[in-house]
Amino acid sequence: MDVETHQAVFQWVLQVLAEKKLLKGTTIGVDATTLEANAALRSIVRRDTGERYDEFLMRLAKESGIETPTREQLAKLDRMRPKKGSNDDWTHPHDPDARITKMKDGRTHLAHKAEHAVDMETGAIVAVTLHGADAGDTATIPETVAEAGERITGVVADTNGAEVVKHVSTDGPCEVVTDKGYHSRAVVSELTEWGLRTYCSEPNRGRQQWRGQQREQQAVYANRRRIRGERGLRLLRQRGEKLERWNQHLYDRGGMRRLHLRGRENILKRLVVHSGAANLGLLMRKLFGKGTPRGLAGTLPAIFSAACASIRLWFVTATLVRRFGDSMASAQTAKMISVAA
């Protein structure tokens, strides 16, 4: 099935959440993480010549005058080269969308970048996008925020019930919460032009020059005032609960940190279905008190025992009614309930 079908299923799940009042769409938080690609660095090839890495080093050694280079000589030659892992020069033949990047644990690997927008009031995942791992956060956030706005307004447009429109933002998100990796003059100014209030953590850059950038200065100063206020501090504290928790739940515990798929479309399909299932967990938690099937299975024995107790009490009450009448049966039943309690 194509990507559009998976996106339609994800949109349908959002509509179900909106009907159960689990989607607000007023304040969204944006966060990203890297996913290890199903491709090895030793298999990368040159974009211009198609050479493998060892073949490229052999050619460099011969051009430098070493006819039969040893492994130590090749390693020394490789250490002396600048920008030896540039994505402009190297690619993987079976997964060209993967990019060479440094993972969070310090390892260099081929990876992809997943970015998601989360409703800060309910915790529902509103949008999921996939980018190259070498793309910066400031370059990918506009696409994620725009997709989140389209999905929220699409929920309102596709739902005919008036009750949904009352608690879901009809104009899309009004506030965006991010960490300091997304903060820049261009991003804060662009989101402000879109009519959004930003709550972006600002890194300590020291004294800055604003000559000829009055618009950017006003946007950055307004964002600084908001994040220092009571509401801004509360929203920034909620990032660990509403944003980082999904990284642990989807990618670490959910088995998506190490991908087993290749190609951007295939990975995006899996991410969309994964996120839609996580949203259904919110619905299960509201309906049954448990967010996962395993958690629900643990409560089934208690539900079965409670049902058996209710059936037993009903039979005892019916027997007492036949023997002693309604008044006596009510008294005896009340006595049994108090003893059981």
Image (cartoon, helix red, strand yellow):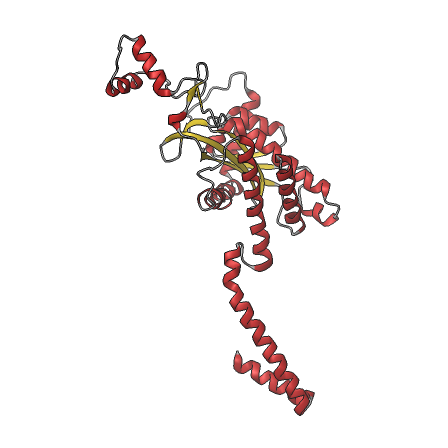
Of all residues shown, which one is farthest toward the front?
68
The residue drawn where x is 61% and y is 35% is 3
Q: Nearer the viewer, residue 278 or 155?
A: 278
**Residue 160 seen in the current view:** yes
Please provide percent x and percent y for residue 192: 59, 29
Left or right, 80 with respect to 116, comes to left
Q: Is residue 316 above or below residue 60?
A: below
Q: Quadrant of the N terminus?
A: top right
The residue drawn where x is 56% and y is 21% is 214
Q: How many marks?
A: 0
Q: Nearer the viewer, residue 168 or 189?
A: 168
Q: Nearer the viewer, residue 58 or 326?
A: 58
Quarter of the image for residue 42 reads top left
Q: Nearer the viewer, residue 41 or 218?
A: 41
Q: Is residue 160 above or below residue 104?
A: below
Left or right, 91 with respect to 320, comes to left
The residue drawn where x is 48% and y is 31% is 112
Left or right, 298 with respect to 316, comes to left
Please provide percent x and percent y for residue 31: 50, 36
Q: Is residue 145 above or below residue 241?
A: above
Of all residues shown, which one is farthest toward the bottom?
324
Quarter of the image for residue 142 reads top right
Please provide percent x and percent y for residue 25: 62, 42
Left or right, 80 with respect to 309, comes to left
**Residue 122 seen in the current view:** no
Please provide percent x and percent y for residue 79: 29, 19
